[in-house]
Amino acid sequence: MVEGGIAKADKTEFTECWRTTWKTPYIMRLALSAGIGGLLFGYDTGVISGALLFIREDFDEVDKKTWLQSTIVSMAVAGAIVGAAVGGWINDKFGRRMSILIADVLFLIGAIVMALAPAPWVIIVGRIFVGFGVGMASMTSPLYISEASPARIRGALVSTNGLLITGGQFFSYLINLAFVHTPGTWRWMLGVAGVPAIVQFVLMLSLPESPRWLYRKDRIAESRAILEKIYPADEVEAEMLALKESVEAEKADEAIIGDSFSAKIKGAFGNPVVRRGLAAGITVQVAQQFVGINTVMYYSPSIVQFAGYASNKTAMALSLITSGLNAVGSIVSMMFVDRYGRRKLMIISMFGIITCLIILASVFSQAAIHAPKIDAMESRTFAPNATCPAYVPLAAENAPPSRWNCMKCLRSECGFCASGVQPYAPGACVVLSDDMKATCGSRGRTYFKDGCPSKFGFLAIVFLGLYIIVYAPGMGTVPWIVNSEIYPLKYRGIGGGIAAVSNWVSNLIVSESFLSLTHALGSSGTFLLFAGFSAIGLFFIWLLVPETKGLQFEEVEKLLEAGYKPSLLRRRNKKGKEVDTA
């Protein structure tokens, strides 16, 4: 240990990961097979963004009720909270492999229920089942990969789970586009999730349990056999010795506090090492959600429509770009997480996120201010009984266009039929209905109900893309890496479960409130609010999260035993060297 309690770790190049897995392909087989859970996680959280557009078309009650749209999206998150909480106990009791198999079954049940749903409430039930699987997979897949990875490439390999999450989201947008013109659109989109669940279930049947979990259960010979497939022969004994020391220390604690679930919870919060780990782990998980990322992933097509692109297909095609950038960012994370460290990537990422959110707030503000004006004459004469009820008095007075614009029309729960001559010229403020949308379209004009045609729309897409680029390599993948390595072995399932629950609770709050916030504050105010939350998250990451790159699990424990403080807060001795004040 160095002064201040932080051990120096050798820099690990991205190429080391590929060299190691090329020599030992068994490691990559374990990582990719478990990582399919990440693919399912990404697919099921991403697919709903496109499917929701068509669910609204099939069920009028969903189209008319914002809270029902939010519920369909967020019930998967509610299920994930339960899945993550129960998953922590299942991980410790029955093993990482069994947790993944159970998650696959839940994914499959949820996909079938949603695909066959005759009513919105059945879709919600299916989303809850999918959520159970997502919650378990979100914590189990990175945990399994980290425990089956050599320490020097652990960050890069756990990042494959993040890559597969973002890859799953990208794949979901491709599937959404593929089924746009297919009968049953959203049923196919939601039902396809059952296929990778079946594939992973079959693959995991042929793979072993985590070697660390096996050693903890006194199945030492099995643990050694797996380590011999992962590590070079000259490193196996050292790894076995480290496992022995760690497990013996945990069993000594266990003799004092007990081994029941309640005892583990009590012991976790009573153990200063676990408490410090939880402070860091929960901080990064909550911060990951309150930067607003899942509003982008869940509602990406809707946000694109807020920016002024009315077509469902266009909105999903543009959303595909943001999802693709997210996947590319995960590859960048794999390249740099073991070279530059977890902490540095997250802090840089947060600065970029805050900047992009502030710019997005400005762009949406300008788009609202400069929205096309309302033509009173056209609104009054467009079609019989077509004028927006809230605009009728002004239309009767033949009010000038400057009195109202498109955004004010939409906020009055009406629709805007754009000018057929010039897209940003004054248009008609009309009633919100499918018939009026058809009438507007029959005249070669575009009907807007979620956003207004705007010269600033392309800027919203550009900075939405930049937001994803700065988010994905840092806050996208690193929080899961941190939580897979920061807890002592005995508390890894419980600690990861508690942190995952905090992630999903935060996710639920953000996703359930997003549409209501945009209605109350507008898109500009909502993104500015997320920028404020991000600034708070940045401060607590700087304050509480240590660097763990290149450290063995046992070294991470020693780091937390000493207590962590940022270098700015460490007391210096007379020689100017940092000393531990924990």
Image: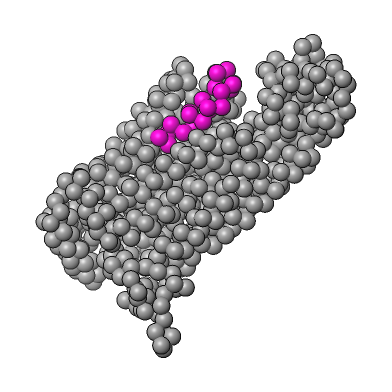
| Residue 76 part of the magenta-drawn span | yes
Total number of numbered discs in the rendering: 0
Residue 521 is at least partly visible in this image: yes
> Residue at left 48%, top 20%?
120
The quadrant the C terminus occupies is: bottom left
| Closest to the observer, 391 or 285 | 391
Q: Is residue 13 visible?
A: no
Name which quarter of the figure residue 525 lies in: top right
Examine the rendered structure and indicate whether residue 239 appears above or below residue 374.
below
Task: Choose between 526 and 164: the one closer to the eye.
Answer: 526
Q: Main secondary structure of the magenta part?
A: helix
- Horizontal and vertical percent position of residue 401: 86, 29
Residue farthest to the bottom, as pictured: 575
**Residue 439 or 351: which is nearer the viewer?**
351
Q: Residue at x 82, y 28 (%)?
A: 374
Vertical position of residue 339 compared to residue 34: above or below:
below
- Image location (x, y in percent) of residue 15: 45, 66
Horizontal placement of 187 versus 149: left or right? right
Quadrant of res 4 = bottom left
Question: Quick one: 30 or 8, which is closer to the camera?
Answer: 8
- Magenta range is 60-78
**In the picture, residue 80 is in which quadrant?**
top left
> Is 271 left, or right, of 295 in this rendering?
left
Q: Is residue 489 above or below residue 440?
A: below
Q: Position of residue 421 (x, y in %)?
A: 86, 29
Image quarter (top left, top right, bottom left or bottom right) of the N terminus: bottom left
**Residue drawn 35% across the image and 76% down it:** 580
Magenta stretch holds residue 311: no
Asked if 207 appears above or below 72 in the picture, the reply is below
For the point 72% across and 24% down, the residue is 415
Q: Position of residue 170 (x, y in %)?
A: 53, 42
Q: How is the image coloured?
A: one colour
